[in-house]
Amino acid sequence: MPLSYIQPSIDSPWATYISQVDRVLPYLGPLARWAETLKRPKRALIVDVPIEMDDGRIAHFEGFRVQHSLTRGPGKGGVRYHPDVTLEEVMALSAWMSIKNAAVNLPYGGAKGGIRVDPKQLSLKELEKLTRRYTSEIGIIIGPHQDIPAPDVNTNAQIMAWMMDTYSMNVGATATGVVTGKPLHLGGSLGRVKATGRGVYVTGREAARRIGLDIGSARVAVQGFGNVGSSAAELFGQAGARIVAAQDHTGTIFNGQGFDLALLVPHVKATGGVAGFQGAEALDDESFWDVDCEIVIPAALENQITPARASRLKARLVLEGANGPTGLAADDILAERGILVVPDVICNAGGVTVSYFEWVQDFSSFFWTEDEINVKLDKIMVGALKNIWDTADRHKISLRTATFAVACERILMARQERGLYP
Ligand code: GLU
């Protein structure tokens, strides 16, 4: 029977995820018997988050925490604050976390949370109240051994500090391991802020090498210039690539010679976006997808590469820094056009990998150097991508389906070995 409470809407992230699972079924052998497990979140919590606004009004926000799978370990995945957050979206994002965590072999299930809110409309005090009340409400299912939130779209180290403090106050002990992506002096890890962008770079570097694309002379277009997009851009820049286009919610900029990132990154920090950057010309947003380049990095939100945009893209390589940026139909068009996609579920796994390092360091209260972290991250990402690449070659399937094959086999093997209770 299909789920009664969610009928996937067309092209929604959840519908995309379900189709991605359907595509992997032929490669799961006898484990396919357990595959329905993947199509049902284990647990979904919807909470009301009321706060008193600065002007005295009482405002209510919808909050979610979905634990898609706890089969391989505690839930793990970020929390996003965005006006478009829905239960269906959080279900998909939590499911992609299960796949991502299994793909890099982290001892976690998959979870995700979100609040339907535009945080830019809130004062700092309101943001803190929202975060603390949300944390209290989901406190019944999170914990260092249950489910460990982290930053995602529009959430950051300060929000993680408030979450850690609220949870700790409620349990009566400082519990640093309840969230990752914390500030450094509160049990955060070196390298965590840039880890997702670094993982995008590492998988991009490996994929480029395998298809004979020279990064040193590549032109790169980046959509989303937040934490992920800007960190990836900096690493590609250091490797000699030119970042020729950037787009975010404030606009689109272009410079065929490549931006001076030493000026662009501070400009974005100071003004809140790429718009108005002196060393570039402004483009209309849709033209971003027509820019001459070898590599495109969607590092913003879901469903950005539509079929129409997929038909126009000039790049050879798409590195999915965001979760779910390419819809199913667009994915097929890119494949037909010979454009290689390194899928989100491996490409952006660097963030959660260093989250795992943070969690381990919190438990042992012993902290590693940034070099140690970056070396370990590189090794895990390269090894995971190699395994996925070999699987893709063996079955003649896309990297996305191969990532699902590797991950689903791990999840369903654990499911089978644990057996059904009772
Ligand atoms: N939000 C990030 C992601 O989508 C990181 C999650 C985490 O570190 O738990 O992978």
Image (cartoon, rainbow, N blue to C red):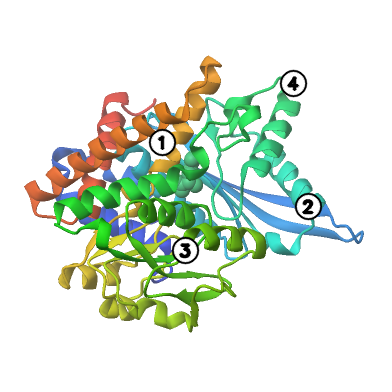
- The residue at which mark 3 appears reads as 260
Real-space Cα separation, disc 4 to disc 2, in angstroms = 25 Å
In which quadrant will I find the N terminus? bottom left
How packed is label 4: few (under 14 Cα within 10 Å), some, or many (20 or more)? Answer: few
Q: Position of residue 400 (x, y in %)?
A: 25, 54
Real-space Cα separation, disc 3 to disc 4, in angstroms = 49 Å
- The residue at which mark 2 appears reads as 124
Circles 1 and 3: CB distance less than 8 Å? no
Compare residues 110 and 227 and report the one nearer the observer: 227
Disc 3 marks a residue whose amino acid type is Asp
Disc 2 marks a residue whose amino acid type is Leu
**How many numbered discs, if any?**
4
Can residue 252 be seen from the camera position used here?
yes
Real-space Cα separation, disc 1 to disc 3, in angstroms = 30 Å
Q: Earlier in the sequence, mark 2 or mark 1?
A: 2
Real-space Cα separation, disc 2 to disc 3, in angstroms = 32 Å
Which of discs 3 and 4 lies nearer the camera? The answer is: 3
- The residue at which mark 4 appears reads as 172
- Numbered circle sitting on residue 353: 1
State the residue at coordinates (60%, 27%).
Answer: 187
- Numbered circle sitting on residue 327: none
Disc 1 marks a residue whose amino acid type is Thr
Query: Position of 84 compared to 298: left or right?
Result: right
